[in-house]
Structure formats: C-alpha cells, structure tokens
Image (tube, rainbow, N blue to C red):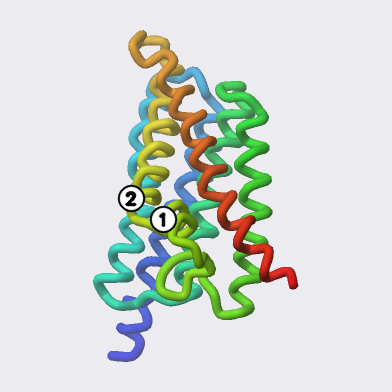
Amino acid sequence: QIKNGLKMISQIPNLISIFRTALTIWLSIVVLNDPHNVKVLYLGFFLTWVIIILDGVDGIIARKLNITSDFGAFFDIACDRVTELIFLALFSTLHWIPFWVLVIFLVRAVIVDGIRGLASKEGKTAFGEKSMMESKLGLFLTSSRFMRFTYGGVKLLAFAFMFISQMKVFSFLQGPEMFLIYLATFLCVVRGVPVIIEGRRFFS
C-alpha cells in the first residue's frame, strides 16, 4: 500500500498536466460553439489563468516532493506545447489573431522539440542540471526562471485578455492584447533560436 501510495503521489504533476490540457481542449470547444457570448468569454478569461498557472504548479509540486524525472519534464513541456497551440489555433480560427502567428509557434515547436528529442538520446534535457544548452546566454534565454516566468506571464496576459477584448465592453483593453501576442511571439522565437544554434552538434 505504501508503494502504491508513493506511486500515486509521484503521478500528481503528470495528472495536473493532463487536467490542464483536457481543460484547454474543452474550453476551446465551448468558445468555438459560441464565441460572441459574454459569459463564455468571461469563462475563457478565468480558465486561462487557471490553465497557465497550473503549468507552474505541477513543477513546484514535483520539486517540493522530490519526484522530478526526465519523463515528467518531457511530459510537462509536451502538455505546455499542446495547450499553447490550442489557444493560438482557437484565436486564429476565430480571426482574432493573424494566421502567421500560429505558424511561427508551430514551426518553432516542431524544430525545437525535434532537436530536444535528439539531445535526449544523449542524456540531455531541455532544462535542469543536464540541460543541452552550454552557453550562458543559451541557458539564460531557455532555462532561467526569469525568462520562463516572463514568457509564461506574457502568454497568460495575452491569452486571457484576448477573451476580454472580444467583449467590446472595456475600451481600454482594445489593442494591448495584440501587443502581448506579438511580444509572446517575439519571446517564442528568441527562446527557440539558441536551441537551434546549439542543437546543431546533435546532428553530427
């Protein structure tokens, strides 16, 4: 029973990742069915906060309980990528953002995660002590808490306020959400380029 209990505890971060991914899928379906409903837009705003904050919670729990693992790190990144792309696909489908923004995030995800997959075969990880990044700048841009918090915070505000801006009620929120989307796109590229540059060695 103790072993089963410890096994269940070790799965808590992964279960949180699964929950927030499923919640994102459900939310996107609800919004697509009624994108002009104010109540639905409010729901999108609040659930976006829940979904993205949970992305940080699973990592905190894993570190606090000392149950971090290479698979857990991979699974967390995979779920984060899925939720990110679902939000962007939703916004693009509804013509709230330009299609090219989705394309940039999608291309970056495929290339960067592909390189990280090659690195994992040599025992390297995206973050942490076994990070594939070797340069200080690369480590800062991709792995530092500052950059990860900044990138996550910008995405949170961009995605959440995208719903609010569609209500056409709060005039002062008309415009800032697009600036945040473009800023998130910029950070997406800036954090992906070092992985591509340093990841070339894994192709040899």
* Amino acid at pointer 1: Phe
**Which residue is more in the foreground, 179 or 12?**
179
Near mark 1 (Cα within 10 A), the count class, few <14, some 14-19 or many ≥20, is some
Q: Relative to 174, does residue 34 appear above or below in the rendering? A: below
Q: Relative to 176, does residue 158 appear above or below in the rendering? A: below
Residue 107, horizontal then vertical, whole percent? 68, 45
Q: On the image, which quarter does residue 39 sit in?
A: top left
Residue wearing tag 2: 146
Is residue 16 visible to us here? yes
**Which residue is more in the foreground, 200 or 183?**
200
Q: On the image, which quarter does residue 139 sit in?
A: bottom left
- At mark 2, the secondary structure is helix
Q: CA distance from mark 1 to mark 2?
A: 8 Å
| Mark closer to the chain start, 1 or 2 | 1
Residue 141, horizontal then vertical, whole percent? 45, 52
The reply to whether dot 1 and dot 2 touch (C-beta < 8 Å) is: yes
* Amino acid at pointer 2: Phe
Q: Relative to 53, does residue 176 appear above or below in the rendering? A: above
Residue wearing tag 1: 140
Q: Which mark is residue 27?
A: none
**Which residue is more in the foreground, 12 or 151?**
151
Disc 1 versus disc 2: nearer the observer: 1
Is residue 75 visible to us here? no
Q: Residue at x 60, y 61 (%)?
A: 198
- At mark 1, the secondary structure is helix
Residue 22, horizontal then vertical, whole percent? 49, 51
